[in-house]
Image (tube, rainbow, N blue to C red):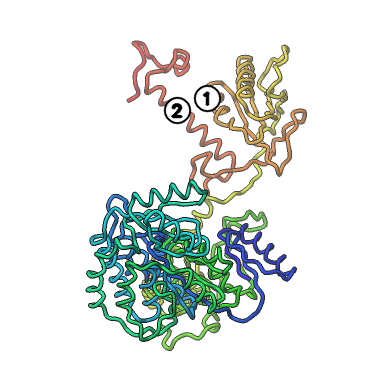
Amino acid sequence: MAILASQGVELAARLARAKAAVARSDTLNDLDGGVFVGRPGTCPRLGFLFPGQGAPCRLDGGAWRRRFANLAGLMDGLATADGGATNSTELVQPAVVAASLGALEVLKGAGISASVATGHSLGEITSLAWAEALDPPAALQLASQRGSIMARAGTPGGAMLRVSLAPDEAEHLAQEVGAVVACRNGPAETVLSGSAEVISLTAERCRSRGVDASKLAVSHAFHSRDMKPARDPLARVLAATSFRPIRHNVISTVTGSQLSSRTDPRQLLADQLVAPVLFDTALDLIAAQSDILVEVGPGHGLTRLVRACGIAAFSIDAFSDSLRPLLSTLAALFTAGVDVQARNLFSDRHLRGFDPDAVPYFIESPCGSHDETTDTTAPLAIESDPDVSATEPQPEGGDSLSIVQSTIARETGLPLSEIGPDDRFLDALHLNSLAARALQVGLPSAPTEFANATPRQLADALAEMRTFRANDLAQHRIAGVRPWVRTYAMTWANSPNSLDGENQIRWLQLTVDQQLPPSFAPDENSGLAISIDQPLTLTTAELLVALVAQAAKAGMKHLALCHKGAPVSAFLRSVAQESRLRERWCWPVAARHGPVSPCRRIPGNTLRQRWSDRRTGLPAGRANSVKARDHHVRRCRCRRRRRKRHRGRMCAADRAQRGRDYSGGPKPCR
């Protein structure tokens, strides 16, 4: 069974589907759905298909270049397209061969090999490289020279047409219009070549007869007499190319037969320019010698032709923008019984292997939970583990770098050989504290300095600390962590009963949509409590402002707003600054305390959430009580009054109250 998924939800759904298929003893090969289920059996015989110039031209390498760094050399020598023209012969041919050679390298790393192969037109060069008759660099250079010669020496003005006809029927049509059969692709598809006028006439004949036909995006009439001028220049290039005897089974699409060790590749590739591509004949031979065919190169044109004949085939679509076709093909081959070495695909990536018997454990952030039973004032310390080195043998002499690397390997599950001394572990590990514990030294005062370090740098620093460490190692405290944790910590405290005293305040409790009664006459010991029990919309806000304004005009001295997370704290502070309120409260109704009923007296000992730095501006640890916060607010109020005097806005009543002579207008304070 094999699953291909990119998200956790997708993985869960596809695992359930695969489980159901296993329970029914069914086989499943869903390339689009990413679910593959097979049955135990013998390993199938594989055959490789190498595409020709009709395959897509991908000069940038797509996702394959980013994932497989060892393929960069194949693409560095490719020319770039001017103006985005990627259908020119001199660009397409080396690009297609480079993609096929890169795909061969990736499949080889995954343990995939074939017993027979064939190449469509240009793919004949790749099949010779697979058969070890030609070195990969020489094959790429030959493809580049072949494309340049065909573009330069071939007769211009040619075209090609794909028709949905059997080869014999297409031969009769070609004789009628003066074209030639260029490719015998299968029992229901043939490609014709000729001049542009002849191909246009052929397309009209096909439309009149109800035959599907489409022109190919090519620059010349390949595999026709238009390529005869390019035969001699290519023959000279082939004579200078070094070939070896063919060592593997190759079915030629030039002769339609199997090549032997005595076959002359130079004569074969020279004749290929003007000879038709006998892919239908080669397909019959390769299908008889294989169970599954894999298209090794860009695109999936050959896969489409093979599947139309009822033969199992898959395409890896080399150098595309996604690795999904490659992974889907490997998954299908694995469930068919092929021994896929998937580990080699990830050998250059730092990934932890999946152990189904392992019990996972998680590192919990000190700020990720709120446990009221935890004593947040206790000092932060590292758990003592004196027997760390006993779980894994340490190198002789206690080398710091080896200890750091072995500790990282043990904690992450990575092989020790994959942790280099100069590998940075910012994005993956963050385990410098564990390495320090294994070295039995105190941690640095600022541990984040090692966040982007390497094992070598960390080992040097910890070795120095071990050399100059203090005698007393009883307390391993991390300096600088407590303020950071306290900033995000949430605490609850009992506020002092500011309403207790000789004179209890008498509260008039109203909702925001109610009006003050006509008999409302506030005094020093009466106040108004407004309950906002509905969402704070524009209408609700207007009702609240009108009700508070009416109460302020009546001489109200105490005001309280009870709400459920409504943004009214700033409004209440503004009312307190502009009015002569003695006290004001803004109490959020927390879910843990339950709703506050407007018909119930508000208790003076209500639990309030205390934000140490956000509400008061005091440093963390200074806001120990509501009294300290209220004192800070009153002090801020006084500063605002002084700023108003500095701007010369003191009113006559304030000047009289201060008892100072301000005749001649307000004077700024010195």
* Label placed on residue 217: none
Taking the spot 43% from the left edge, 69% from the top edge, the residue there is 278
Q: Which residue is mark 2?
A: 640
Give how far apart the Cα atoms at labels 1 and 2 are.
10 Å
Q: Nearer the viewer, residue 635 or 140?
A: 140
Q: Is residue 245 visible?
A: yes
* Dot 2 amino acid type: Arg
Left or right of 662, for residue 616: right
Kindly indicate whether the residue at mark 2 contacts the one at mark 1 (C-beta within 8 angstroms): yes
Left or right of 40, for residue 219: left
Q: Is residue 446 visible?
A: no
| Residue 421, horizontal then vertical, whole percent | 38, 75
Taking the spot 63% from the left edge, 71% from the top edge, the residue there is 1
Q: Which structural element holds mark 1?
A: helix
| Residue 214, horizontal then vertical, whole percent | 44, 51
Quarter holding the C terminus? top left
Q: Nearer the viewer, residue 233 or 663?
A: 233
Taking the spot 48% from the left edge, 47% from the top edge, the residue there is 207
| Residue 99, horizontal then vertical, whole percent | 39, 66
Q: Earlier in the sequence, mark 1 or mark 2?
A: 1
